[in-house]
Image (tube, rainbow, N blue to C red):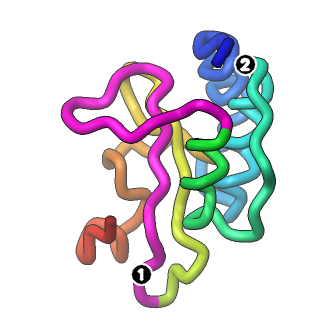
């Protein structure tokens, strides 16, 4: 896979909002595309795992590195799940996630896969 993760990260940083607008998958997918890799679109963020694998991404364990992408499953009222990219300092989706990987209180309480 030829992918410019710095271009993807820069795109995400440039377009991130102050608060979520419910478009995490769109913003993360567009950032990945800005780096030169195209994903098969899915309706929900939680379903992007197979699209990422088909594009050449793979599952890793341990501390996140710049360019890592997280796909988080649904929880409670958050039925779409979540998708974000690590920029080397923080996780970013459609907004800068200053509280870590999990984007909101419901996710932080339930900690879905």
Q: Secondary structure at mark 2?
A: loop
Q: Residue at x 26, y 76 (%)?
A: 110
Foreground residue, 89 or 63?
A: 63
**Farthest left residue in view:** 62
Q: Residue at x 60, y 65 (%)?
A: 47
- Earlier in the chain: of badge 1 and badge 2, it is 2
Q: Quadrant of residue 18?
A: top right
Q: Which residue is mark 1?
A: 75
Q: Quadrant of residue 54?
A: top right
Q: Secondary structure at mark 1?
A: loop
Foreground residue, 102 or 44?
A: 44
Circle number at residue 15? none
Q: Which residues are magenta?
A: 55-76
Residue 4 position within the rendered picture, expressed as x and y whole percent measured from the top left: 66, 11
Q: Is residue 80 left or right of residue 32?
A: left
Q: Which residue is mark 2?
A: 35
Alpha-carbon neighbours of circle 1 within 10 Å: few (<14), some, or many (≥20)? some
**Mark 1 in CB contact with mark 2 (< 8 angstroms):** no
**Farthest bottom residue in view:** 76
Check if residue 63 falls in the magenta segment: yes
Is 37 situated above or below 43?
A: above
Residue 69 position within the rendered picture, expressed as x and y whole percent measured from the top left: 49, 38
Q: Is residue 15 left or right of residue 107?
A: right
Q: Which SS type dominates the magenta stretch?
A: loop
Check if residue 2 falls in the magenta segment: no
């Amino acid at each position: 896979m030829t992918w410019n993760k710095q271009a993807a990260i820069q795109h995400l940083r440039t377009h991130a909002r102050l608060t979520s607008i419910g478009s995490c998958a769109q913003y993360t997918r567009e950032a990945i595309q800005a780096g030169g890799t195209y994903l098969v679109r899915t309706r929900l963020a939680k379903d992007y795992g197979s699209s990422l694998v088909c594009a050449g991404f793979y599952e890793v364990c341990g501390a996140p590195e710049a360019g890592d992408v997280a796909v988080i499953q649904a929880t409670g009222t958050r039925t779409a799940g979540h998708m974000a990219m690590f920029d080397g300092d923080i996780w970013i989706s459609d907004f800068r996630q200053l509280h870590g990987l999990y984007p909101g209180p419901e996710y932080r309480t339930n900690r879905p896969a």
